[in-house]
Amino acid sequence: MIALGNDIELLEPQVHENLAIIPLKTERLYIDVLTLKKGLELGLAEVKECEHSQVNTLIVKNHAVTPLILIDGEEVVGGDQNRIVNATILIDASSEMKIPVSCTEQGRWGYIDEFKQSDYIANYNTRRAKEYASRSSASYQDVIWTSIKKLEFENSFASHTSAMEESYENLKVDHNKIVKEFKIIPEQNGVLIIVDGEIKGFELFLNPEIYREFHEKILKSYLIDSKMENKTFAINIDSAREVINNALGSTFEKKQNNGLEEAFEFENSDGLGTLCTYQNKILHLSYFKKLEDATMDEPNEDVSLKSNI
């Protein structure tokens, strides 16, 4: 197993109101991979519906001479309905494959346009719920839909098609102001998130270039599930280091891979997460604080009349 431990450098914390981040930095790793964002922009990647459309499967074509990386939770919008990628996947060069996805727009099933990359990833609570569900079931679409309904309820908002993207767009102006308070540090390739003094999770990427594409998306995925308040709290670097060390010291169990990556899941008394590697290097690691109650309750009020789309 890959040993990082003390090789992860915790940089100067950044704080705004009751949200704080600790930028993370590791030794730069050199693997030539293409992100979906760049692949789509350069015309080197395509995301398509299957010949007979399926809610939980899409086809991704990689026309590049390097592997294409898809990150767990990143969203593509368009097609017959919006989807998120179910796991971090590395697709071989000059190839195509069917990938597992989940719908993030329950109320639409009809083609509108070619897929493009969303400005968002699945919100923190949805990703965490998916992490739990993936360990007990091969299919967890209902968990995703329930989580998005709960997101809408908690933000007193609903789109006509229960589209996660629209919940983000509804709060875009406020979120953009907050995100500007948190700067990317040179060579940063990860981040640990603290809300109200509580460590919620952390994320590591292969290199700073990939992290840069996901910096704002990750912060917004936590913001949308948080109530911003003008209060402060102490940042305990030692506690953050302990969370990271405990996560990396967990028992890693191999999962079935989808592409070139090797996939592992891990869990300890405080949290759980997933690690994906390639050529013995970390592609992506995500960690989430455990729920005190791992069940996902249905929202108990109807917000359908509060739509402003």
Image: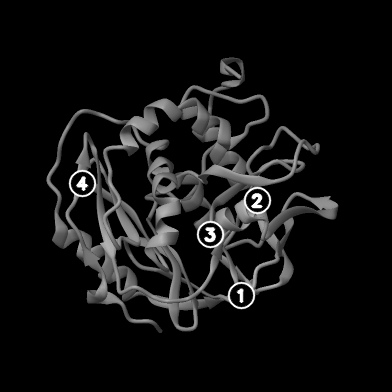
Q: Give the residue at mark 2.
A: 102
Counting residues from the N terminus, which is met first, the one under dot 3 or under dot 1?
A: 3
Q: Which comes sooner in the sequence, label 4 or label 1?
A: 4
For label 3, the residue is: 71
Name which of mark 4 and mark 3 comes first in the sequence.
Answer: 4
Q: Secondary structure at mark 2?
A: strand
Amino acid tagged 3: Ile
Q: Secondary structure at mark 4?
A: strand
Outermost residue toward the right in this view: 52
Please provide percent x and percent y for residue 137: 63, 61
Percent position of residue 197, x then y: 21, 45
Report the front residue among 36 and 190.
36
Query: Would you name the residue on which mark 1 appears?
Result: 256
Most extreme residue toward the front is: 42
Residue placed most toward the observer, 149 or 22: 22
The residue carrying mark 4 is: 14
- Per the model, the C-alpha gap separating discs 4 and 1 is 37 Å
Quadrant housing residue 259: bottom right
Residue occupying image coordinates x 56% and y 38%: 148
Could you tell me if residue 88 is visible in this image?
no
Mark 2, other Cα within 10 Å: few <14 / some 14–19 / many ≥20? many
Q: Amino acid at mark 2?
A: Ser
Residue at 50% in and 58% down: 131
- Is residue 40 toward the left or the right of residue 286 in the image? right
Bin the neighbour count of mark 4 within 10 Å (Cα to Cα): few under 14, some 14-19, many 20 and up.
some
Query: Who comes first in sequence, dot 2 or dot 4?
Result: 4
- For this view, does 55 lie left or right of residue 89? right
Which is more foreground, mark 3 or mark 2?
Answer: 3
Q: Amino acid at mark 1?
A: Gln
